[in-house]
Image: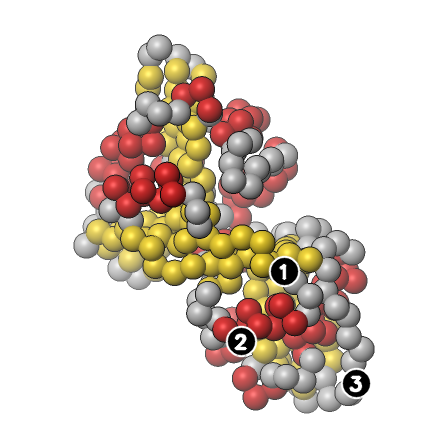
Amino acid sequence: MAIEVRSLQNVTVTELTDVFNDSFSDYIIPLHLTEQNMSFKLYSELIDLALSVGVYDEQRLVGFMLTGVRNEGAERYYYNAGTGVIPTYRGQGLVALMYEYALPIWKKEEKRINLFLEVIKGNDKAIKAYKTQGYEISRDLLCFKGDIQKVQQTSDDWKIKVVEEINWEVVVAFWDIQPSWQNSVAVLNKAKEDVRYQVAMNQGEIVGYIAYHKNSGKVFQIAVAKKHRNKKIGRLLFNEVAKTVNKPILVTNVDCNGVEIISFLKRIGLELFITQHEMILKFE
């Protein structure tokens, strides 16, 4: 066995999809991506394959660490968009080898470095491994799915309409919580070909919005202006998405501190199905 750690710069989508599915086939919640799913993940999550890492045995890819990258002022953010090792190669310290390879490269940046990842609560082995690398749990992220309870519009005070893009300077004021990497503004802007927006209007003013994947039923963001809450606007926005995609709704990575949005998601019929820890490692 000749193990080599190197960049994933030249990996093919087919090769990456195969090793991803093999690595997560026995996960707490088994994952399976198509090549189309993988391509969407790569560009929408800002993954830089040149800064992502693979473990090879001869020319066979047996482990990987996908790295998303974005810059904000003096800060550089890296996102671990998936780390996996195929079952027959586990227990050999390959994840540690990938970090040994990657960290010196990442630390060359003159910016302050922030590393993010998510790991399923209860995956104690992985959590312990990440803590060994220096990660700390920053918050819990809740994931919901199901068929929503539909509601009829009872007021003409607002209208729901499709828009091509969102004025983020306006709607960020509606937020109670910060979105995770996968639901961030940077990701939505990058994946704009696959993201759709609907807004609730009141007297020419946006009072709520929802951002979702055009086909899958995944909702990335929803928010309603504080003074317009409890008027069924959020329910109506979800209604429109459900009618558009005609599939069960999925809402992932909701900050556990968002008590109001969590209560709302449960009231409209969605069920909590998994909790993840968001973990952060910082370098000054």
Closer to the chain start, of discs 1 and 3, is 3
Mark 1 Cα within 10 Å, few/some/many (few <14, many 20+)? some
| Residue that lies at the very extreme toward the top in this rendered image | 1
Instruction: Indicate the quadrant where residue 270 lies.
Output: bottom right
Q: Residue at x 29, y 35 (%)?
A: 99
In the image, what residue type sits under mark 3?
Thr
Q: Which residue is mark 1?
A: 271
Q: CA distance from mark 1 to mark 3?
A: 26 Å
Question: Eyeballing the image, is 105 above or below 272?
Answer: above
Between label 1 and label 3, give the one nearer the viewer: 1
Query: Which residue is at a point 57% across and 37% down the rendered structure image?
Result: 30
Sequence-first tag of 2 and 3: 3
* Label 3 sits on residue: 154
The spot of residue 233 in percent (x, y) is: 68, 79
Q: Residue at x 77, y 70 (%)?
A: 150
* Residue highlighted by disc 2: 260
The answer to whether residue 148 shows anywhere in this view is: yes
**Mark nearer the viewer, 1 or 2:** 1
Q: Who's the residue at 22% across and 44% down the image?
A: 107
Q: Residue flagged by tag 2: what amino acid is it?
A: Glu
- Closer to us: 274 or 133: 274
The image position of residue 274, as x and y in percent, is 54, 53
Give 198 or 91, whichever is nearer the viewer: 91
* Quarter location, residue 181: bottom left
Which element type, helix, strand or loop, lies under badge 2?
Answer: helix
Q: CA distance from mark 1 to mark 2?
A: 15 Å
Question: Would residue 186 be visible to someone looking at this image?
Answer: no
For this view, does 53 lie left or right of residue 13?
left
Q: Position of residue 91 (x, y in %)?
A: 35, 25
Disc 1 is placed on an element classified as strand
